[in-house]
Image: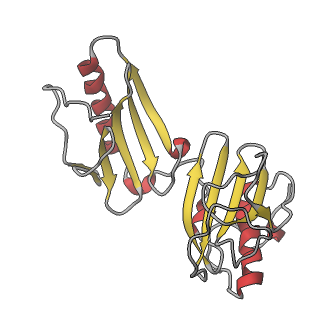
Amino acid sequence: MPKPEIPDACELPCAINGWLYDTDDTSNGHVWRSSEHDCSIGVFDTIGSVAVRVTDDRVSGFASNITLERIDYDDDRDAALVDGFAAACEWMTETDPDAWSHPDVCEAVFDAPPGYALETYYLENREAIVYYRDLAFDGDRPTRRVPDEYSRENCPYLYVHEWRGSGSATVALTPWTEAHGPGSRHPEIESVVETPSECGLEVAVTMARQWAREHTEGEIDADATGQAGLEGWSA
């Protein structure tokens, strides 16, 4: 879907309060980004309404953004776009890029377990899914065949999953990203730790760090975001 045409009444700023207009953006909206922080704000025409959304660009998934304003329209699309651009500019004027954070993003996810690197962090309405890639894995990408036994040798990804709001979480090995996870009739993961009930994503990441430390002989970063150990957790 192409970007909406800019109404004649609008003149979009190239820069405002640390937000820079992205001329290379390939989305269907007009987007400003921070050059120092992984966040962006955009104005999008969603057919029948104009949406102003701010996004944590480190995260994938439908819930990676927050809708600041939605302006419905029947015929006067240009008027809705003018109002959307005005709302975006007002918000950028009032909000420094380093002052905004997504309320549902778990910062602990970005400090990977020892021996692993963050591959993908999906944030959806019902679930959060994290894949960490094993830095020691140097084999070919596994074929789409579920292994008879799951191990670090054939499963280069450490998988952390949370059903959002329930606190139910999983820490597992998987041979690939986009694996069928908990609740699937044919899961493509195997749990490596037993997570406590109602632990949530941050505690699940803590348990993933501890498991990785035991199996990679690496050390947990003492300055990592989140909990250094489970002794700080209670249900």
Q: Is residue 108 left or right of residue 33?
A: right
Q: Is residue 198 left or right of residue 62?
A: right
Residue that appears at 42% across and 26% down = 70
Provide residue 23's location: percent of width, then percent of height: 21, 49
Provide residue 146's location: percent of width, then percent of height: 72, 62
Residue that appears at 35% across and 40% down = 42
Q: Dividing the picture into quarters, in which one does residue 147 lie?
A: bottom right
Residue that appears at 61% across and 65% down = 143
- Give whichever of 87, 134 is nearer the camera: 134
Q: Quadrant of the N terminus?
A: top left
Residue 219 in view (yes/no): yes
Residue 88 vs 82, above or below: the answer is below
Provide residue 93's location: percent of width, then percent of height: 31, 43
Q: Quadrant of the C terminus?
A: bottom right
Residue that appears at 33% across and 36% down = 88
Residue 227 vs 22, above or below: the answer is below
Residue 91 in view (yes/no): no
Residue 41 vs 211, above or below: the answer is above
- Give whichever of 119, 125 is nearer the camera: 119
Provide residue 75's location: percent of width, then percent of height: 29, 11
Q: Residue furthest bottom?
A: 217
